[in-house]
Amino acid sequence: SEGVARLGTGLWTMARRPTGQASGNSPVEMAAGSDRVYVAGEESLQVYDARLQPLAIIPLEGGAPRAMVLDSDNQRLYMGGHQGLYVLDTRTNQLSKAPVDRAGFVDLALDASGGRLYALSQHAADWFGAMDVIALDTQDWQEEVLYTTLSGLLQGLIVDGARDRVLVGSTDDHAMIPISLGSGEVAPRLPLGIEVIEVIADERLYVSDSAGWVHVLDRHTYDEQERVYGGRYISLDARNGRLYAGDTRQPVVAVYDASSLDRVGEIAQPGKPRAKSASGEVVIVNRRFYVFDGASGEPVGELEPGIGQPPEECPGCYYTVARDVVIDGQRDLVTTITYTPWPGKSGPQESIDFAPVSGRAY
């Protein structure tokens, strides 16, 4: 909060330069080139030379950036924040807003050529908690969405040019997500720490971990018999012989033969699967309660229409979202768990049980 400090590489001597008297201009983000240091505060961007002598103060009309990156030629400084993406021409100190119809930037990274800018940003103003990984052409500002998650915190963005991929940190998964720069294909997560997420006890044990692997164990010896990559959440439909695996960071819910573990299908809806064995359907929870036919993968409808969608009269308002569902296969009862942020619109904030056949609620 006091300013910018420079540590000498040999003697660890320190030089300090205040960034302003107003507490509102405390340093938020910094970037350094060969002969310039750029320090962004809440109110302005301040430019220093290598000796930390002030050169310029540039007002930030769009507020403080949350991410900054300087190109390899030290000619363009990119700054992303809540209000959008801004570009500073370092030769003229001219600051302009990039013509990108997007806000809520969290992190930025450039490829080696400086021709493509990769960014983590908010998915949409009316969908809180969702994030996109995008690629922007730095000349014509054409946008390509490489990856979207509707739930889960992403942070940290690194371009791995040697392997033609970008790595994104996934806090909830304790892992990095590799995304192909060319195709946008998501490779299996690289775990930084493993946690058991769900366990299903049947004739065998089905165990999912935080990296998205599903382990099948002998129930008596706990020896691993099989392992497949499907997602953090699993659900077994023993009556129809299907095992579902998926999560909100996977593009689909995978369907496996419960005995052979052969992948027999997939459902084009990311989320948390919950099998309804009585009807042969599966509910996929991802802010909404999507219902699909387990055999064909075709959509059937929703358990509670309207959940997980903002009201038409107020697209930017908080709204009730689906969190989980528990299914009693013997009685064909369903318990839904929802969440309404505060302050939020009026809506269901309690779990309810209902029988789809009779329509009775409990």
Image (cartoon, helix red, strand yellow):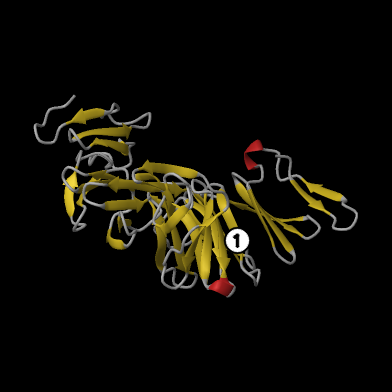
Q: Is residue 40 left or right of residue 83?
A: right
Q: Establish if 317 lies above or below 348.
A: below
Q: Establish if 335 lies above or below 167.
A: above
Q: Amino acid at mark 1?
A: Val
Q: Establish if 87 lies above or below 26.
A: below
- Quadrant hosting residue 287: top left
Q: Is residue 114 visible?
A: no
Find residue 90 and report its horizontal and vertical position in percent.
Answer: 63, 65
Find residue 291 and report its horizontal and vertical position in percent.
Answer: 21, 47
Location of the C terminus by quadrant is top left
Residue located beneath label 1 in the image: 69
Find residue 69 and report its horizontal and vertical position in percent.
Answer: 60, 61
Location of the N terminus by quadrant is top right
- Residue beneath the point at 21% across and 44% down: 277
Q: What is the total number of numbered labels drawn onto the structure image?
A: 1
Residues 154 and 266: in front is 266
Q: Establish if 350 lies above or below 323.
A: above
Q: Is residue 227 visible?
A: yes
- Residue beneath the point at 10% across and 35% down: 357
SS type, badge 1: strand
Find residue 117 and report its horizontal and vertical position in percent.
Answer: 51, 66
Residues 97 and 298: in front is 298
